[in-house]
Image: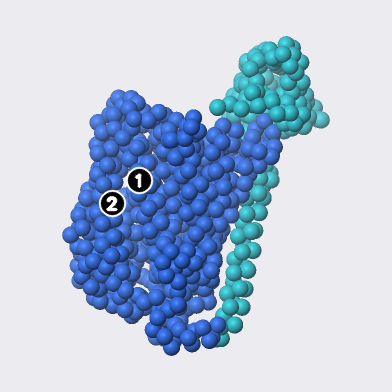
Chain colours: A blue, B cyan
Amino acid sequence: MSTVAAAHDDHDHHHAPTGLKRWLFSTNHKDIGTLYLWFSFAMFLAGGFMAMIIRAELIEPGMQFVDPEFFNQMTTVHGLTMVFGAVMPGFVGLANWMIPLMIGAPDMALPRMNNWSFWILPFAFAILLSSVLLSAFGHGNPSAPNFGWTFYAPLSTKYGPASTDLFILSVHMMGISSIMGAINVIVTVFNLRAPGMTLMKMPLFVWTWLITAFLLIAVMPVLAGAVTMMLTDRHFGTSFFDAAGGGDPVLFQHVFWFFGHPEVYIMILPAFGIVSAIIPTFARKQLFGYASMVYATASIALLSFVVWAHHMFTVGMPLAGTLFFMYMTMLISVPTGVKVFNWVATMWRGSMTFELPMKWAITFVILFTCGGLSGLMLAITPVDFQYHDTYFVVAHFHYVLVSGAVFTMFAAAYYWLPKWSGVMPSKVLGELHFWNSLISVNLLFFPMHFVGLAGMPRRYADYALQFADYNFWISIGGFWFGLSQLFFLAVCLQCALKKGEKAEAKPWDGAEGLEWEVPSPAPFHTFDTPPVVK
Amino acid sequence: MSNDDLQARNARTLKKLLIWAVAMFGFAFAMVPFYNVICDITGLNGKTSNTAATQSPETVVEDRVVTVEFITQNGAGVNGSFYAKTHRVRVHPGEITLVNFYASNPKDHDIITQSIPSITPGQAARYLHKTQCFCFDQQTLTAGEMKEMPMIFYLDPELPKHITTLTLSYTMFDVTERVTGTDNKSDTVVR
């Protein structure tokens, strides 16, 4: 090993393979990060395309473009693709790129595993999405998974289509990929920090990812357990979820949401870390309350294990149970409130400028808080009986996931693209992307609150006439938001082709952190000699 | 720190995390018995006991009347009629009551059925004692048979005061395939 390292020091060029092999066999954290990010973007567009089909069908009452069977498959696979294909790999890609740079490590600790954890993903999604292609174009149109992304039993066991088995296999593969990615992050953060980089000096993005990684290792195996039980129920005569054999379908919901709620935080904690990096940069102030941010993140992670049943208040729980889960859920707003307060306090009397990353970050703070507040409403058991499974829930989780998680990934991309590509992202296209997305995302999701409160149920291909006007505008917002993302595609392509203003090593003058000490674009190998952190 | 040290350290951390991941996979399965125990204690899923009560009630609370309703449903693969002779009885806690259920099998072959009870509110599950129930065992319905199936129960005098009405639901499933191992798809696959 040491001789290899010495050889690297002697030569300017690395000996990595070129062409396709560079990407297939890559063990370099930057290349793998790039692969993850492009993959995530591709899945975002694929999942978005399915959302367009959903919105096209719902633009007016009655059936127009697809039959209800296919509509159900669209809502299911849209959810799965966005959660497991767009948001999670997107954050893993950012972790791959930024964590070694932020803690002064030469690479991820387990580079070969890193390669494997990425390359499982395209196959997992090829399996899942093939079921959709077969459903749309195949002989006899065999159904793709059609039971919602939460795949409740017995809908997914006894009544699931044959493609449920493809779904089970692909979820297993996604799980293995996530677990390996998480292990890699933890080992890297624990063992590869530069001298002097103590845990409480780490950038918050690293902290939030470390905590996220622990959540992933804790709950992805539970998801694997749930789909394994489905598989044996379907084919091997067990009855975990089959009442006829002594099982209980409600058990499925408990197992699923024991995974599902921490999963929600897996998708948002890294976003907190990104915003905590961007706001201080453009407010030109230190982050307010660093230590409280770390503790708040850890508290949110711990609380995420004791709130799962708030997703299933209506299954019929004893009063004491619903009260427990209601209060625990409301408790989460305390550490989350600490975070929002800290971000606002960081901006308070700062020398703020509003470059693109900052615009996205501030939008995140405001819109995520909106989503958080509707979450608090949903936490109240008696009113949840009214809101349960309506568009109010859809509005809530899209506010926290789209204008929450996805918007911070845009923020992160505009913030770090100069470092990744060596060129500044196009301001014109970036502004177009931002303003179009900001307006359309609210047109898309805000009216969903109203139709939800008025009682429009989610997951149906049709609705009562009274919801027609709102749904028309929601669909317009949806198409507008979808098309706006093409600006971002253009931004990314320009950067990938190195077209644009050349970026300095530190393009944002208020930025702090080790990642700005390496040149832009970041060379293939960085921090072969660890930097010393004072 | 030399490279070898680092590799050993990485391997150690990796091993610990892998063990944790495998343990959490096991935890998912451990949730099954854990859930069942919680349900037994709290009646979370409204399942009544699977075994016959052996004690008879000590007292009959004459000054309290509780309504017990019976509803029945056909589960997957059952297409005969399945119903309780009485849909509603008014009983004193501690009073032993018999209710007859009927199930028919219009098919041209025998089926083995299993009925699964569920009670609402779930809290009452612990207080409903059955001394005899067709749901304790699998019932074979021969081709064309109409079968009378008795259920004898009493309510525990300890039944919480606020519960005035109980709904006991039975869902009858065809478990022929499960029991005999035959692959009789047409009966069980519902699409």
Among the 4 quarters of the image, the one containing residue A96? bottom left
Q: Quadrant of the C terminus of chain A?
A: bottom left
Give the mark nearest the N terminus, 1 or 2: 1
Across and down, in percent, residue B140 comes to 77, 21
- Which residue does the numbered mark 2 point to in the structure image? A485
Q: Quadrant of residue A496?
A: bottom left
Q: Which residue is at 58% across, 78% downward? A: B7
Decide: marks 1, 2 in contact (CB < 8 A)?
yes
Q: Secondary structure at mark 2?
A: helix
The 10 Å Cα crowd at callout 2, few under 14, some 14 to 19, many 20 or more, is many
Locate residue B41 relative to residue A43 in the image: left or right: right
On the question of residue A289 being in view, the answer is yes
Q: Nearer the viewer, residue A380 or A110?
A: A110
**In which quadrant is the N terminus of chain A drawn?**
bottom right
Task: Compare residues B67 and A342 and report the one nearer the observer.
Answer: A342
Please name the residue that numbered disc 1 is placed on: A48
Q: Is residue B62 above or below residue A211?
A: above
Q: Position of residue A401 (x, y in %)?
A: 37, 51
The residue that appears at 64% across and 35% down in the rendered structure is: A242
Depth check, front residue: B85 or A69 = A69
Q: Residue B115, image x and y in percent? A: 69, 25
Classify mark 1: helix, strand or loop.
Answer: helix
Which chain letter matches label 2? Answer: A
Identify the subunit bearing mark 1. A
In this picture, residue B42 sits left or right of residue A66: right
Q: Residue at x 73, y 21 (%)?
A: B111
